[in-house]
Amino acid sequence: MEKSNGLAHWYQLNYEKFFKENYDKSVYNDSKNEILTRDECDQHNITLPNAESSYNFYTIAASSLYSGLDMNVVFYYQLYMNDSLLDPLDTLTRDDIINPANNIVVDFFNKNVDENPLTATNAFCALHDGLDAADTRRFAINQFNSGSNCNPTPKYFAPDTTLPANDARNLNCGSSRCIKIAKSKEKYGAVQNDAPAAQGAPIHQRNNAEAMNDAGWYIQEGNYEKFLHQINPVINNQSLSDPNNTTSIGYGNKIFNDANTSDTDYNNLIFGRFARGFDVDDGKNAFYFDIDDTFLKSAVKCGNQNASSGIIKVTYLDSGEAKWQLFYDGLKTDGGFVLSSFPTVTNGNTDTWKTQQFTISCSARFKNGCGYHSDFFIKGMNNRNGIFAMVEFKTEKDSQDTANNSDDKNAALIITPNPSTNYFSVKLDNDAAMESIQIYNLIGQKVLNKYIGNNIA
C-alpha cells in the first residue's frame, strides 16, 4: 500500500497532473499489480469557505477515482453533522447521523472504485474543464503573462493579510497570470478569489488558501472519467478560438441552494462545482461518449443477436428551456447498426440539478457506430445552451466471462518497433486474446480503434 502524496486533501490542488502520473508509474511498474493507494480528506486545518461542502466532497471523489485511488480515508466530522464530539451540548443527535448528500458521494466513490474493467459494473464521466496556467498553448504567453517568465512557485507566497487577497501587491507573475486566465472564463462561472493560493506546492496551498480558485498550475484540464470517455472535448487545433473546448464549453460554480425539503437526490448540494455545456452559437451542441471496450467485453449479453443492455444516467441543469436528446448505437434484427434514441428532454427554469435515467434493454450494439465513433451521444435540439454535470453508465457483468478473463489484466503489452513512425505490432506477453485496441494521442484524441479477434494487431 502507498499513500498518494496529497491527492485527496481537498479540491483543487496544484500539480494535480503529477499525482496521476506518479500513480500510473507506481502501478504499472509493479509486475504483480498489487499496489493499493489511499489518501485522506483532511480539510480540518484550513479556513477555506465551504471546504466541507458536499459539492467539494464530490469533486474530491471524482478526481480521486480518475487518478486511481483505491481508498479515500475521510475524517469523521467531514461526513457527520451535529455531532456531539464537536458540540458537547448536542445530546439529541445520534453520532451516526451522516449528511445525506455526503452519503450519496460515499456511495458514488465506492461503486466506482473497481479498477478492473472486466469486473467493474459502473462507468462515469464527470464533466470538467480545468484552467491550467501551465498550458501556454491554450493560454498564450503574450496574452496572459504580466512578465516574461511566469512559473509556479513551490514555496507558498504568504500575502499581506491587511490587503485584499487579489491586491496587486500580493501577486507575483504566476498568480497574476492565473487571474487573467480566470477572468477570460468569467462568463462561464470561473472565479479566482484567492490568487496568491494559485502558487505553492499542494500542502502549502492547502494549509493557507482562504477562498476558491479555478485557475491553477498543472491541474487536470479535461474530464474526470473512468471507463467512459467523452470524445473530442479537447483537440490541438490552433485555428479554434479555444482548443480545449471543441464539442462543448466548460462551466464552473453553477451552485444553487437546495430549498426543496422533500428533495431526495440532494443534487443541488452535490453538483455545480464544474460542468460542461453547449455553445450553440459556435456550433458546439453535442457530447459524444465511448464506453471502454474491455468494460463492455464482460457485460451480460441478451437475445439471439448478442445485444447489450445498460442504464445511462445524465445529470443536467434544469435551466434555460434547453431541449436535448440521447441517441445510442442500436442493434437491428439482422445484427447491423441503427441509430436509436429516447424522447426529447425539455428543460424548465428551476435552476435545479436533475438526473434523468435512460434504460436500454437488449437493444444496444455499442460498437462505436454513432458520430465520431461514439457509443452514444447527447445532442441539443434547439438553440438553447444546455449544461451537464455528469454522465454515468451501469451494466451487469457475466461472471463466467469475467472469470475466464481475470488474468488478462496482468498481461503486459509488447509493442514493436517502439518508437514507430509508420507501423507497429501489439501483442500480450501471456498470449491472451485481444478483442480490440484503442490508441489515444497526448491530447485525448482517439487515433485508432480496431477490432481484432486474435492475439496480434
Image: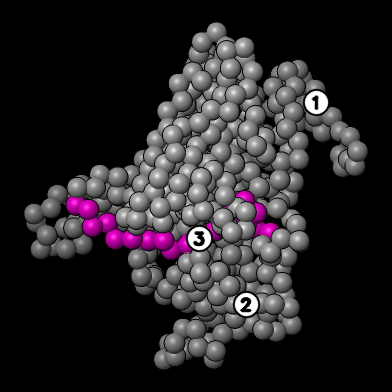
Most foreground residue, 66 or 422: 422
Given the current orientation, which residue lies at the most extreme right position?
422
- Earlier along the polypeptide chain: callout 3 or callout 1? 3
Crowd tier of the residue under label 2, counting other residues whose Cα lies within 10 Å: few below 14, some 14–19, many 20 or above: many
Q: Start and end of the magenta stretch?
A: 243-261
Q: How is the image coloured?
A: one colour
Q: Quadrant of residue 83?
A: bottom left
Q: SS for tag 2?
A: helix
Q: Which residue is mark 1?
A: 457
Q: Residue at x 42, y 73 (%)?
A: 211
Near-viewer residue (35 or 195): 195
Q: Can residue 91 be spotted in the picture? A: yes
Q: Judging from the image, what secondary structure is the residue with disc 1 in?
A: loop
Which residue sits at x=55%, y=72%? Answer: 182
Residue 109 image offset from top left, x and y in percent: 42, 43
Q: Nearer the viewer, mark 3 or mark 2?
A: 3
Residue 11 shows up from this direction = no
Q: How would you classify the magenta stretch by its main secondary structure? A: loop
Mark 3 or 2, nearer chain start: 2
Amino acid at circle 2: Arg
Query: Which circle, 3 or 1, is nearer the viewer?
Result: 3
Disc marking residue 5: none
Q: Rate crowding at label 3 as few (under 14), some (14 to 19) or many (20 or more) other CA atoms within 10 Å.
A: many
The picture places residue 20, in percent across and down from the top left corner, at 60, 51
Looking at the picture, tell me which residue is in the foreground, 332 or 45: 332
- Dot 2 corresponds to which residue? 177
Query: Which picture quadrant has residue 370?
Result: top right
Question: Which residue has dot 3 on it?
Answer: 251
